[in-house]
Image (cartoon, rainbow, N blue to C red):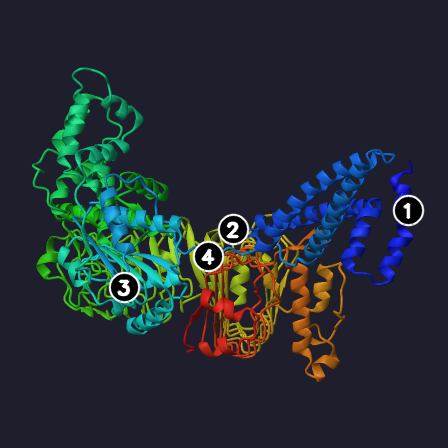
Amino acid sequence: MADPSMISAALQPVCGFINNTGLPAATARQFSSFFCIKRNWRALTKANEYLQALEKVVQEEVTHETNQLKKCHPLVELWLRKVDGVLVLVDDIDRECDRLMQYSCFCNYSLVLRKRYRIGKRVLKTLKDLGELIEQGNQFKEFGSKPLPDLVEDRPRIEAFGIETVLKDLREYFDSSNVGIIGVWGPGGVGKTTLLNTFNNELKEWGSDDQVVIMIEVSNSGTLNIEAIQRTITDRLGLLWNDAEAETTRARSIAKALSRKKFIILLDDVREQFQLDYVGIPTPDSQSKSKLILTSRYENVCYQMGAQQSLIKMEYLGKESAWELFRSNLSINAVAALESPATNNVVREHAEAIVKSCGGLPLALKVIGRAVAGLTEPKDWSLAVEATKDDLKDLDGVPAMFNILKYSYDKLIETQQQCFLYCTLFPEYGSINKDKLVEYWMADGLIPQDPRKGHRIIRSLLSACLLEHRKSDSSEVKMHHIIRHLGFSLAGQENIIVKAGMSLEEAPSHREWKTARRISLMFSDIEDLCIPPECKNLVTLLVQHNPKLERLCPTFFEFMPSLRVLDLSHTGITTLPVCKTLTKLKYLNLSHTSIESLPEEFWVLKELTHLDLSVTKALKDTFDNCSKLHKLRVLNLFRSNYGIRDVNDLNIDTLKKLEFLGITIYAEEVLKKLTKTHPLAKSTQCLSLKHCEQMESIQISDFTHMVQLGELYVESCPDLEKLIADSDKQKASCLQVLTLAELPALQTILIGSSPHHFRNLLEITISHCQKLHDVTWVLQLEALEKLSICHCHELDQVVQETIDDLQSKTTGMEHGSVQNCRGKNGFSEEQEIHGMVDDAWDEYNTFYQNMTKSGRMNGIEHHVDFPKLRSLVLTDLPKLRRICIPREFPCLESIRVEECLNLRTIPLGQTSDCQRLKRICGSYEWWERLEWGVKDIMESKYFIPIQDK
């Protein structure tokens, strides 16, 4: 018989005739599927090969996007699944076609025809499916999409014991549509914070339609700290903080932002009833579907806050849970001693006695457990029992805890104990800067003049749970309020007076001063200290952050011969009283005061090791006293009105022990001397250049010998035109913070090839530089985290980029309709004249976005210009029209725009890699005028309204 392929070839003209005569398409396809199967199979094979290649390209793009912390675009994901399915189908068809073609004659003719008809239809249909998939794949322009920002911030994940029941009750109230406010009450240290942390993390795991979950530590002090609550809310919402803003104004702004969201607010440790609207929290109701959960030590506070119908009491732990919590804090060796199979296990008996004495209070179990964590011998455990054996069966909250917690204190060596008690001098609601704390300790005489020793003690206090890490800042620590009250109970024995953060208007009585060794009056409203107290034993006096304090009586220090630490920073004082009796003083902080001069007899403070005069904007004279203080380790005159105006003023060469120098220089000649291998150069960490007339340029390489220079502040230098950060291949620069302020002639900033002297810059502030039209040079700062530009009235672009620049980055790409434009700002003169700049710029932006949407250009990785930028602040830039072309901002969290009404675009789009964005702040007027294709989408997610000043 004849070969079927020969029959097919013979009948092909018939198929063509059928098509040409206009027979129905379905009939034509049936003829084609039967008689043209071989041709269709070859077409299917080619389409299959093309689809496989296209799938590989798409998959590579998806992999690239997921590596950038994006997720696969849903349409692309669906397409890939369809491709997987159709490729399996093609493999099956290939096998069937192979078997069909093995027939060389019409044996079993009817069977062959049926097979040929069925397979031919499958080939034709699959070929059509492949064509559609190929067309869809070629049209993809977005391969990844940015995941939605987290609605809930993770809280510390600590294994919780015995909270299952109360957690279940909390969930039931939370799920009720009739409940808006839920209260949880119980004694201090019972685990209320642990409960909220656990619930917060469950919300994250469950997922919900809530738009924000905020947890707030309401009070670590006796009085409500509205500012601290507002700061927490603004940070979580992405609102920028303004210290000058009144609390009531700030509350209205917060309330407006919260009212636009479905929120869950967790208030931890509410000690007194307060009006929610005072801090800016709208009262939740059934209509808003928002929730507020609060914890307190007091049942009546929960009632007063609105939780009358939804109140939960948190009980002490049961025996089993208490034991497991205590055991979890012991070392492996201690646990082994507890579980020894010996018949008379004395260690276990002692441990059970300690657990029983804790009365089921989780905080006591945790602290005491860590205090005895390494004990293995019965004798040591016996001593531990004796230390905690006071009658604790009537334990009723915090006061009775101190006998338990004191054991952790007693385990410290004497120096550690004194350092711990020193921490009680700080306000409960605040944090403690570790470096400042160590400086205090050294000056007070608690530790040697070795900062490393101080930081080791801080670590030991953290390990003993007597201090805690500050979540947001590793440079700060805090003290739990219960532990601090323990410190208070012990501080009285050490003659320590703590009035910090109590809003005092008057100083303590003379009787209190008389026997005091350390006094803290910081963060209050004291207006004057007009009577000299008699306190011959006083060693530390902390009066900082009393803004109303303007006067100390002339003899205030007359009866303080033992004083070693004196902090008067952030007060309004204009003069320092006679200080000739302060011969033992080691630490003096007068920063951020209005002091005009140092006393002439200031030189008698021979023991002074730390003198801070930074930001003393009224200081005129020091009477050359600083050069006579030979023991100074720290001398800070950074941004002080008093500075070096003449080479001969530099009379501090004798300070051989100087480790930290902050200085203000008023003449270029002095600057040159300081930077030419001067001994002081190695100590300079903060440098302010101010009113340096006739200084036309600054070259950062001139600061090479300032090996520790971390901050440079250039201000009011009228002739400065150029700043040069040249290349530096020898040694990495330490410069991290740069401020350029009130420089009317500055118009050029040049940065050399990498590595250059600005390569470690983290923060830049540019203010009142009226000749700057752009700051394109910031593109070269790969470490930059914060950029702030304000009051630069001629700035029309942040980054000036021409189309030539774009083409230079995209060599080998098709330039499409983009033209070479060599006029101003990269546009042709004709475009400028006829007002076509905006249209050309739009075309430019669109083209750039198309090229960079996937982060790759023609197979070449796209360079990210702002890899670490977190914050961009633009204020009072009336001519600013654009920031830069759309690009990736992988770390950008915040954009704030004020008084920049001509700025009509933001360099972000739906496809921009900006997964960390939290907020875009600006006025409603500016937002309404914004010409941005995704504005409506971005408004609900990121826009935070503010008022222009």
Q: Earlier in the sequence, mark 1 or mark 4?
A: 1
Assess disc 1: are there few (<14), some (14-19) or many (≥20) residues with their C-alpha within 10 Å of its C-alpha.
few
Q: Which of marks 2 and 4 precedes in the sequence?
A: 4
Q: For the residues labelled 1 and 4, say whether their Cβ atoms are less than 8 Å apart.
A: no
Separation of marks 3 and 1 at Cα, in angstroms: 98 Å
The image's mark for residue 545 is 3
The image quadrant that residue 136 belongs to is bottom right
**Foreground tag (3 vs 1):** 1
Spatial distance from mark 4 to mark 2, Cα to Cα? 41 Å
Sort mark 4 into few (<14), some (14-19) or many (20+) by Cα contacts within 10 Å. Answer: few
Label 3 or label 2, whichever comes before in sequence order: 3
Three-letter amino acid code of the residue under disc 3: His
> Which residue in the structure is indicated by mark 1?
9
Of mark 4 and mark 3, the one earlier in the sequence is: 4
Q: Nearer the viewer, residue 519 or 444?
A: 519
Residue 875, image x, y percentages:
48, 73
Q: Nearer the viewer, mark 4 or mark 2?
A: 4
Badge 4 vs badge 2, beta-carbon distance below 8 Å: no
Name the amino acid type tagged 2. Val
Q: Quadrant of residue 353?
A: top left
Dot 4 falls on a residue whose secondary structure is loop
Q: Are marks 4 and 3 in contact (CB under 8 Å)?
A: no
- Mark 4 — residue? 149
- x and y, in percent, of residue 772 in the image: 59, 73
Q: Earlier in the sequence, mark 3 or mark 1?
A: 1
- Look at mark 2 in the image and give the residue it sits on: 707
